[in-house]
Structures are given as C-alpha cells and as structure tokens.
Image (cartoon, grey):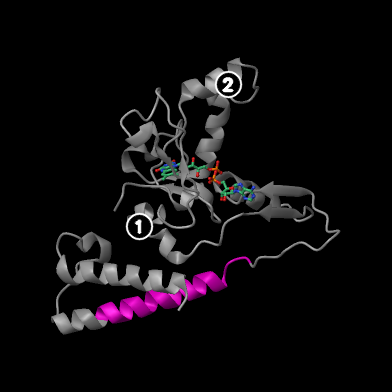
Amino acid sequence: MKKTTIFTVLIAIMIGLLQLYLPNKYSYLYGNDTGGSRLMNVLRLGKGILDFWKESRRYIAEQVPDTTPEFGDTFDFIVIGAGTAGATIAARLSEISQIKVLLIEDGPHESLYMDVPLIAGILQTTNINRKHQTKPSDKYCLGMEGNSCVFPTGKVVGGSSVLNYMIASRGGAEDYDRWAEMGNKGWAYQDVLKYFKKLETMEIPELKSDNDYHGTNGPVHIAYPP
Ligand SMILES: Cc1cc2nc3c(=O)[nH]c(=O)nc-3n(C[C@H](O)[C@H](O)[C@H](O)COP(=O)(O)OP(=O)(O)OC[C@H]3O[C@@H](n4cnc5c(N)ncnc54)[C@H](O)[C@@H]3O)c2cc1C
C-alpha cells in the first residue's frame, strides 16, 4: 500500500474516532448527527474512510500530470518553485492562451490529507518540509537548544502554504511604505492594497462592508474558523 493511502486511512480513522468518542465537543467538525448505536457509528466510520480514500484517489487523478520538457522545448516564462507565489504567477500567466509557461517544482504533488488543517503540525515531520535549522546565534533563538530554531518551509506543489496554519495576515503597511521610500515604485501600501483586496472574499461579517480595505470577489475566502 502506498504511503499516501496509509496516511489517508489514518486521518480518516482519527476523524472517525473523534466522532465516536468526542461527540459533543467536536460536533462542529461533522454535524450533530451522532445518534445511533455504537455499531452504526463504526459502520459510518468505515464508510467515511472509504469515501475519503475514494475522494483522495479522484483528487490525485485530477492533478495536472508531470510533463518533463523535451530537449529543445521553448517557453515564454519559466517559473521555479510551485509555492504560494510561483503557483499563483504560473496560473495567472497561463490565463493568456498564447503564452507557454513551464513551472518547475522540486517536491511532490499535494495529497488530499494535506488539506486537513488539524495535521499541519504533523506535516512538518514529513518529507514535504525542508526542515531548515537556523545557525546558532547569540542574537536570536536564545530560548532554544543550541540557540538554534527549526525553520520549516514547504517542498511540495503549493509550497509552504501546504504546511501553514491558514491564518490570513497581510504584511505591515510601514514595511511596504519603507520599500517605496527606498526607491521601489509601486510598493507603497496604498499601491499594493488593491491587490490584497482583489485576491480576497471577506466573509467575516464585521469586515465585509469595509470596502476600503477588504475585497468581496477574490479567490481567497477569509472567514472565522468553524
Ligand atoms: C509552518 C508555517 C506556518 C505558517 N503559517 C502561516 C499562516 O498561518 N498564515 C500566513 O499567512 N502565512 C503563514 N506561513 C507563511 C507562508 O506560508 C509563506 O510565507 C508562503 O507560503 C511563502 O510563499 P513563497 O511562494 O514565497 O514560498 P513557498 O510557498 O515556500 O514556495 C517555494 C517553493 O519553491 C520550491 N523550490 C525551492 N527551490 C527550488 C528549486 N531549486 N527548484 C524547484 N523548486 C524549488 C519549494 O519546494 C517550494 O514548493 C507559514 C509558514 C510556515 C512554514
């Protein structure tokens, strides 16, 4: 059995066990339908595992296949790294039909189980994390063993966004303004704000109507955790 399948089954079992033993506390994960006998719950767990496994097979089958370029192939753009930035740039460039784009990624394809937010921490122990370690220093990581911090980054299609905690945070306005002051035209916060707005659909009720700072029609949906 492939590693991915084993992992998928383990995650499904974990979700099922939550359903069996913590029905009230975690009901927001799977709804309130926790009635029925224990046997029924076990059967539902089995069905859940099967559905998740089938869904992950379908997901993998739908991935864009790896295509190694032939010798002599030419491209208008070569994007190195299919992380947060690279995948977005390649996707946007690909919207122009006359343009040929090559996207190169060092890591494997993403699997469905990697989308489960609960396991973000576990993913850091796998081969999709580059597992960098900072150099020992007397200026930072002073509370860590050997004054060195673990510095995770993604090595997978999706990059570090596959490992991250999905907290929506923008860079600080002062940083953008300072970059502009240093001579980088177009990088002031007011310049980049339109792109932050363009990419988001704000679903937090109190912020939805704040059209000066938030977008309502972008691909990234921002909401409170369920
Ligand atoms: C553990 C963790 C938690 C985080 N939590 C949050 C959060 O909650 N909210 C938030 O907004 N941000 C969070 N971040 C930060 C955010 O995920 C990153 O800032 C963002 O994903 C970086 O995007 P990137 O495109 O610059 O790099 P990456 O997404 O890291 O992409 C770089 C890609 O390039 C590939 N690559 C590198 N070298 C090569 C090469 N030579 N050839 C081919 N491919 C190569 C890598 O494999 C990788 O896939 C978190 C990051 C980590 C690691």
Residue at disc 1, secondary structure = helix
Q: Does the closest atom of ligand 1 sit within 8 Å of the Cβ of label 2?
A: no
- The residue that appears at 49% across and 48% down in the rendered structure is 160
Q: Earlier in the sequence, mark 1 or mark 2?
A: 1
Above or below for 193 versus 175: below
- The residue that appears at 36% across and 34% down in the rendered structure is 146
The dot on residue 179 is 2
Start-end of magenta stretch: 44-64
The dot on residue 119 is 1
Residue at disc 2, secondary structure = helix
**Residue at far top of view:** 181
At label 1, the amino acid type is Ile
Q: As rendered, which of 167 and 110 lies closer to the eye?
A: 110
Residue 71 lies within the magenta run: no
Q: Nearer the observer, disc 1 or disc 2?
A: 1
**Label 1: few (<14), some or many (≥20) within 10 Å?**
some
Q: As rendered, which of 216 and 61 lies closer to the eye?
A: 61
Q: As rendered, which of 159 and 198 lies closer to the eye?
A: 159
Q: As rendered, which of 159 and 171 lies closer to the eye?
A: 159
Disc 1/disc 2 C-alpha distance (Å): 36 Å
Q: Position of residue 130 (x, y in %)?
A: 50, 49
Q: Position of residue 1 (x, y in %)?
A: 45, 79
Report whether residue 49 is seen: yes
Q: Does the closest atom of ligand 1 sit within 8 Å of the Cβ of label 1?
A: no
Report whether residue 95 is seen: no
